[in-house]
Image (cartoon, helix red, strand yellow):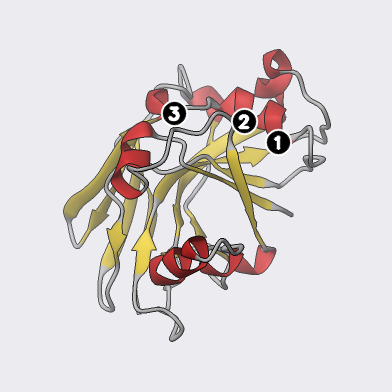
Amino acid sequence: MKIIAVGMNYAAHCQELHAAEELPKEPVIFMKPDSALLKDGKPFFIPDFSEQIDYETELVVRICRLGKNIAPRFAHRYYDAVTVGIDFTARDLQRKFRSGGMPWELSKGFDNSAVIGDFVPVNHFKDVQNLDFYLNIDGVKVQQGNTRDMIFKIDNLIAYISRFYTLKIGDLLYTGTPVGVGPVKIGQHLEGYLEGEKLLDFNIR
């Protein structure tokens, strides 16, 4: 099982963190190991190697078929469910690595950095490219987005990624985060919603 993630896929978020950079011309892809997965409402423990762990709320797509070099018009056949997830980022490490021109996987792929909620079949939705999702922390909405605002749409992401990686059943695709990322603290309660339904519920320890 692979965890594939997309960076800088919402224009407002790009402005939020990378205002001096142009919007990407191609998807920005990175990977997380399977040891990054955190599910079933288990708590997230803040690691001791970072002074700033940021939440990044995202729509997560579950791959359901084996595929390579998938055409965009067929990409919708390769995923069957979606959920809300959190791409936790060690922001201080990411800044350090990026400023030095070094790879920044350590800031993204550490243990339990890929949180997922309960999956919902895609056929429950009229259009996966028009889904509202948001994150509450201690009952207060802190981040909200809609999949229509993606720079690179889901089917195009799948087509692009499958040029480089064979997609397999059970692979997960984190599709990028909208504006509004921020740090988490010990004791906080996080809840993620998709189209008003709570799919993600866990605590920070």
Number of numbered callouts drawn: 3
Image coordinates for residue 85, horizontal then vertical, percent: 46, 51
Name the residue: 70% across, 36% down. Answer: 161
Name the residue: 68% across, 18% down. Answer: 72
Q: CA distance from mark 3 to mark 1?
A: 16 Å
Find residue 157 and name its label: 2
Q: Earlier in the sequence, mark 3 or mark 1?
A: 3
Q: Name the residue at the left extreme.
A: 140
Q: CA distance from mark 1 to mark 2?
A: 6 Å
Which residue was labeled with disc 3? 150
| Marks 3,2: beta carbons within 8 A | no
Identified by mark 3, the residue type is Met
Look at the numbered disc 1 and give the secondary structure of its residue.
helix
Identified by mark 1, the residue type is Ile
Name the residue: 65% across, 69% down. Answer: 35
- Residue 202 in view in this figure: no
Quadrant including the C terminus: bottom left
Look at the numbered disc 2 and give the secondary structure of its residue.
helix
Q: CA distance from mark 3 to mark 2?
A: 10 Å
Which residue was labeled with disc 1? 161
Identified by mark 2, the residue type is Leu
Q: Nearer the viewer, residue 44 or 32?
A: 32
Image coordinates for residue 140, horizontal then vertical, percent: 16, 54
Image coordinates for residue 144, horizontal then vertical, percent: 27, 40
Vertical position of residue 188 compared to residue 68: above or below: below
| Marks 1,2: beta carbons within 8 A | yes
The image quarter containing residue 20 is top left
Image coordinates for residue 42, horizontal then vertical, percent: 46, 70
